[in-house]
Amino acid sequence: MTNTVTSTAVPAATIGARLRGALPVERWENTGFPGRWVGGTAMVLGPLLMLAGALLRARFPFFYPDQLAAYERHPVLMSTAYGLFAAGGLLLWPAVAVVAARIGARSAGWGLWGGVLVVFGLFARAFHAGVDHLAFQLVRSEGAGPATDAVTAGYGAFHVFATLNLAILAGWIVLALGAWRTRVLGPVRAAALGLMAALPLGVLKGTTPLSLVALAGLCAALVPLGLALLREGPRPGRAAVLRWVPLTLVTLGLMVLLGQAG
C-alpha cells in the first residue's frame, strides 16, 4: 500500500509582494526621489498655496507690529493666510527635489547646488513660520501690545537658521540658472522661477507687490511643469486610486490628531 503524503502549499506571493500589488508605487528612474506623483502634485499645490496665503494677508501693512495687530482683529483670516503660506513652502521641497534631479541628470553641479541651497532656504522659512505661530499665540494670551514688545526684544537675536538667509535668496537664482542652462525650463519660465529670490524673508512679514510678483513667477514656472510631469507616464488604475486615496486621507487625519496631542 502506498502512503499518501499531504504537502502544505507555500503561498505564491509574500506579504510584501501583496502590498506592492495592492498599493503600487511607480519606479523613480525618470524623476528620482520622491517620484512623479509626489513631485508633480507638489509643483502644482505648493506655489498655489503660497500665493493664496500671500493674497489673504495682502491688505495689511507689511511689518510685524501691523501683522500682530491684524491677527488680533482677524485671527481666523491671519491664521489661514500664514498656514497656507507655510503649507505651500513645505510642499516646495519635493517639487524642488524633482527639478534639481532633472537638472542634475544633465549638469550635476547646477542640480546639486541649486537643490541644496533652495531646500536649506525652505528649512529657514519653516523656522520663521514657527516663530510666527508663537507670536500669534502671544497675541491670543497677552494682546497685540505685549506680543509686539516681546518680538521687538528678540528681533535680530542670533539663531542658527539666520545663516541660511543667503540660501533663501541665492538658491532660487542658482536653480533657475541651472534649469535654463539644462533646458529643463525655457528662458521665460526660468526667469520667472528666479523671481523667487525677491520674496521677502524673515519673521512676521506680510505681503508686498514684489511678493505677489515673485509668487506669480513661481506659479508660472512650476505649475505647468508639474502638470506635464503628472501626464508623462501612465495613470494609475482605478483600484489603486481607491486604495491610495482613503489610506492617504486616514494617514493625514491621524497625523493631525497625534500632532495636536503633543
Image: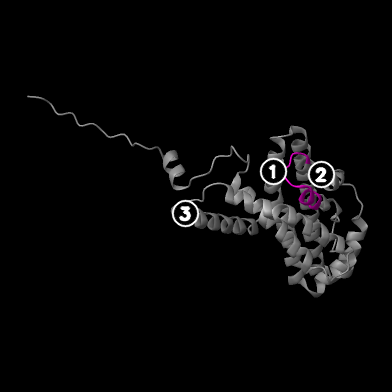
> Does residue 208 appear anywhere in the picture?
no
Residue 183 falls inside the magenta stretch: yes
Q: Position of residue 44 (x, y in %)?
A: 67, 56
Sooner in the amino-acid sequence: mark 3 or mark 1 = 1
Q: Position of residue 41 (x, y in %)?
A: 63, 53
Question: Which residue is at 78% across, 45% downward?
Answer: 118
Q: Local crowd at mark 1 within 10 Å, few (<14), some, or many (≥20)?
A: many
Q: Nearer the viewer, mark 3 or mark 2?
A: 2
> 93 or 255, which lies in front?
93
Residue extent of the magenta highlight: 181-192
- Residue 238 placement: quadrant: bottom left
User: Cβ–Cβ below 8 Å for labels 3 and 2?
Assistant: no
Circle 3 is placed at which residue position? 243
Q: CA distance from mark 1 to mark 2?
A: 13 Å
Circle 2 is placed at which residue position? 171
Answer above or below: position of 9 versus 141: above
> Does residue 170 appear anywhere in the picture?
yes
Q: Local crowd at mark 3 within 10 Å, few (<14), some, or many (≥20)?
A: few
Question: Which residue is at 73% across, 71% downward?
Answer: 76
> 226 or 253, which lies in front?
226
* Amino acid bearing label 2: Gly
* Amino acid bearing label 3: Arg
Answer above or below: position of 31 versus 62: above
Answer above or below: position of 213 versus 30: below
Circle 1 is placed at which residue position? 97
Give the left or right position of residue 23, taking residue 3 as reference. Answer: right
Question: Which residue is at 81% across, 52% downward?
Answer: 196
Q: Position of residue 65 (x, y in %)?
A: 90, 66
> 179 or 15, which lies in front?
179
Sooner in the amino-acid sequence: mark 1 or mark 2 = 1
Q: CA distance from mark 3 to mark 1?
A: 26 Å
Sooner in the amino-acid sequence: mark 3 or mark 2 = 2
